[in-house]
Amino acid sequence: MHIHELQSHFIPHILKLVEDQFVDANALTDIDFWKRFMKNNNMEVDFSWDDISVDCQPLDEMITLIFYSFPMPYVVSEARYGLIFINLYNPKFHYYLLEMASEDKWILSELATDESRKEHGYFEGEPTAAEFVNKIFELEK
């Protein structure tokens, strides 16, 4: 599995399993679970797990952010950051990616669990993680 497949297919698949209550929500942050899942399904990766980090930040009782940091992209469509915005006020999970669109342009995309994609605009130059998160908060208002 290439890093792009993890970002654009595997994580939405795990999110769908969580939404359908087949696995616990901890599966979204448990990289060891991901490794076991892939091993049990004879999936190999061509990236280092050490280059991926996950941080879960509850903002209040009803809103939680799960932030993913991925290795620096080398090709268009790979993502630098990912974020799952969990809003229990109106049970929704939104999965966003900051994807490389060109050498100096980045796109904010939202992926649904059916892997459909919605684009939410571009950044000129690589935005910081904070700029990425702030843009998502603007979308989620």
Image (cartoon, helix red, strand yellow):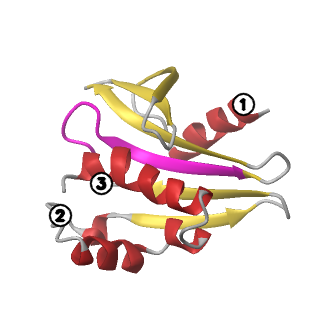
State the separation of the CA atoms marked 1 and 3: 25 Å
Residue 32: name its quadrant: bottom left
State the separation of the CA atoms marked 2 and 3: 14 Å
Residue 137: name its quadrant: top right
Rendering coords of residue 26 (x, y %): 57, 73
Q: Is residue 4 above or below residue 70?
A: above
In the picture, the disc for residue 88 is none
Check disc 1 and give the amino acid type.
Glu
- Dot 2 crowding, Cα within 10 Å, few <14, some 14–19, many 20+: some
In this rendered view, identify the residue nearer to me: 115 or 121: 115
Name the residue beneath numbered marker 1.
138
Residue occupying the point 55% across, 39% down = 132
Name the residue beneath numbered marker 2.
45
Name the residue beneath numbered marker 3.
71
Left or right, 2 with respect to 52, comes to: left
- Dot 1 crowding, Cα within 10 Å, few <14, some 14–19, many 20+: few
